[in-house]
Amino acid sequence: MFETLRQLLWSNDLIYATLRLATPLLFAALGGLMCERAGVINIGLEGLMLGGALAGYLVALKTGNPWLGLLAAAVAGLLAAALFAVVVITFRANQIVAAVGLNILMLGLTGVALRAAIGLSQGQTPAPTIPIWKIPGLGDLPFVGPVLFAHLPLVYIVFVLVALVAFVFYRTTWGLAVRAVGEHPRAAETVGINVIRVRYLTVLWSGILAGVGGAMLSIGYLNTFQEGMTAGRGFIAFSAIIFGRWTPLGTMLASLLFGFADALQLRIQAFGVNIPYQFLVMLPYVVTLLALFGVGRSKAPAASGVPYVPGEE
C-alpha cells in the first residue's frame, strides 16, 4: 500500500507532467499579473487563452508550421486584449463585467470560427505540434535529464520569463512605473508617468502571453482544437495570481501547485484507482478553491479595478 502511494505521488512522470501542465497556466498568470500590478483586473484570461488555442491550431494546420501557429496565437491574444483594453481603459467600463463578456464572446466566436474553417465534420485533421527540445548534454543526465531537460521549448521559456518579470518589476524604472500605477495612479501621473499608456501595454502583454498559453494546449499538448478546451484554466491562472500574492515567484509556485493537481488526477486515473473519473477531474478546481481559502489577508494593488481619468482630481 505504501509503495503504491509512493509511486502515485512521486515519480519522474508526475514531475514531468506537472511542469507541462503548469506551463500554460503560468503563461496566462504572468500576463494577468502584469495587468493586476497596473490596476486592471483581467479575468478574461480564459477567453484570451481560448482565442490563442484556436488561432494556433488553424494556422499550424493551414501552413504546416507550428511556429507560425504560435505566432498567430500571440497575435490573436493581442487583438482580443486590445478590445478589452479599449472597453475598460478608454471607455472605463466595469472590468469584471467586461472580462466576463470577453470570455463569453471568445467561447462563441471560436466555435463559429472553427466551423467556418473546417466545416461540420466529426473528425478534425491533426495539426503539426511544437516539437520537444532535448537540451544537449543535460537531457542525458540520469533522473533529472528526462524530467527537466526534455520539454517543449515553451516550458523553458516560461520559467525564464518568471525571472525576467521579477527583474522588470523590482529592478527597472518601467517596473516601478507599473507598480506605482497599480497602487496610486494619481501620484504616478504627477511624476510624469502616463497611466493610460502603462495600463494599455500591460493588458496587451497579457493577451500575448495568454494566447501563447492557449496555443500550448492545442499545438503543444495535442494536435487539435476542441470547443471550450481551456476548461477553466484561465480562471485557475487568475487564481494563481491571488494565491501567489501578486508576485512573480508566488504566481509560479501557485501555477506549479495547480499543475501538480492536474497531473495527479491523470496519474490516479492511469493507476486504475476505483474512483469515478468525474471526481478526479474535479481535483484541480478543488485545489484551486482550497488554495484561495488559504490566501489570508493578502492585499491586491490598491487601485486594482478602479478606472482612471487623466487629469481629474
Image (cartoon, grey):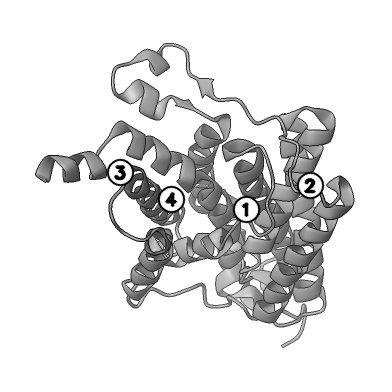
Q: Measuring 81% from the left and 56% from the top, which residue is drawn there? A: 79
Badge 1 or badge 2: first in the primary sequence: 2
Instruction: Say which of marks 1 and 3 sits in front.
Output: 3
Indicate left or right for 285 with 174 as reference.
left
Which residue position is annotated with label 3?
271
Q: CA distance from mark 1 to mark 3?
A: 49 Å
Q: Under tag 3, what secondary structure?
A: helix
Q: Nearer the viewer, residue 171 or 298?
A: 298
Q: Dot 2: few (<14), some (14–19), or many (≥20) neighbours within 10 Å?
A: many
Q: Nearer the viewer, residue 240 or 271?
A: 271
Badge 4 or badge 3: first in the primary sequence: 4
Q: CA distance from mark 2 to mark 3?
A: 40 Å
Which residue position is annotated with label 2?
75
Mark 3 belongs to which amino acid? Answer: Phe
How many tags in the picture? 4
Instruction: Say which of marks 1 and 2 sits in front.
Output: 2
Mark 4 belongs to which amino acid? Answer: Met
Res 204 seen here: yes
Q: Measuring 72% from the left and 71% from the top, which residue is drawn there? A: 104
Instruction: Give the position of the C terminus as an image quadrant.
Output: bottom right
Which residue position is annotated with label 4?
252
Which residue position is annotated with label 1?
174
Q: CA distance from mark 4 to mark 1?
A: 21 Å
Mark 2 belongs to which amino acid? Answer: Val
